[in-house]
Amino acid sequence: MAEPFVLRLATDDDVEEITRLIDETGSWLRDKIGTDQWNRPWPDEAARNARVRDGVARGRTWLLRDGGTLVASVTVEVSGTPGLWTERELRVPAVYLHRLVVDRHYKGMRIGEFLIGRGAQRGLLERPSARELRIDTWSTNDRLHEYYIGLGFSKIHGIRVTEDETPSGQLLSKPIRDVRPCEELAGILHVQEEGGPARAEQAEPAGQL
């Protein structure tokens, strides 16, 4: 039997690998899809790396590994970015996913879908009242928008233009109660969470819209 994928929190030792995976994915997106997402670190390499390092240091970033290979990463937050999300939107309890990236060699295995489900569950453990799962995406990557729409997300009308001119101005969301539980995919993918199987702890029901 093949060794299981391992899901665990990232550590400082993983930051370089995470940024390398983001850069490799950016090159693939440019060459194969024709989008400018992650073609260069935004606004520069130092600032991008600082964001990645901060998410890791605060215990927000999760990794999926296949032996010694970094397969995927996602950062889970329970507060949104002021200026990107409106004050009214920020008053709605929500879980936010950032920098969801999957090694292209593992394309088609539904790893992104698994991490979306696991991220929603993790966020609900911390913020049980959350009503929505939210993602900000690169404004020009239509293929990525279609991927999320295929998973039940809806576009929030209009591209957000912020003071710092973030390229991730296309927002999407879905009711968090509609996020597919990840246990089935964990079984299909043969995922184990560090310290035990990747099974969700029981969280309180999400609030109603």
Image: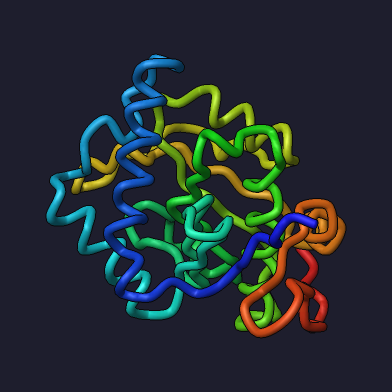
Q: Residue at x 48, y 46 (%)?
A: 101
**Nearest the camera: 117 or 88?**
117
Q: Residue at x 63, y 46 (%)?
A: 112
State whether residue 202 is above or below residue 181: below
Would you say 176 lies left or right of 75 here? Answer: right
**Nearest the camera: 196 or 159?**
196
**Nearest the camera: 66 or 56?**
66
Q: How many marks?
A: 0
Would you say 16 lies left or right of 209 here? Answer: left
Q: Whole-percent x and y of residue 185?
A: 80, 54
Q: Quadrant of residue 121?
A: bottom right
- Quarter of the image where the N terminus is located: bottom right
Q: Residue at x 62, y 27 (%)?
A: 146
**Nearest the camera: 97 or 69?**
69
Q: Whole-percent x and y of residue 83?
A: 32, 55
Q: Quadrant of residue 166?
A: top left
Q: How is the image coloured?
A: rainbow
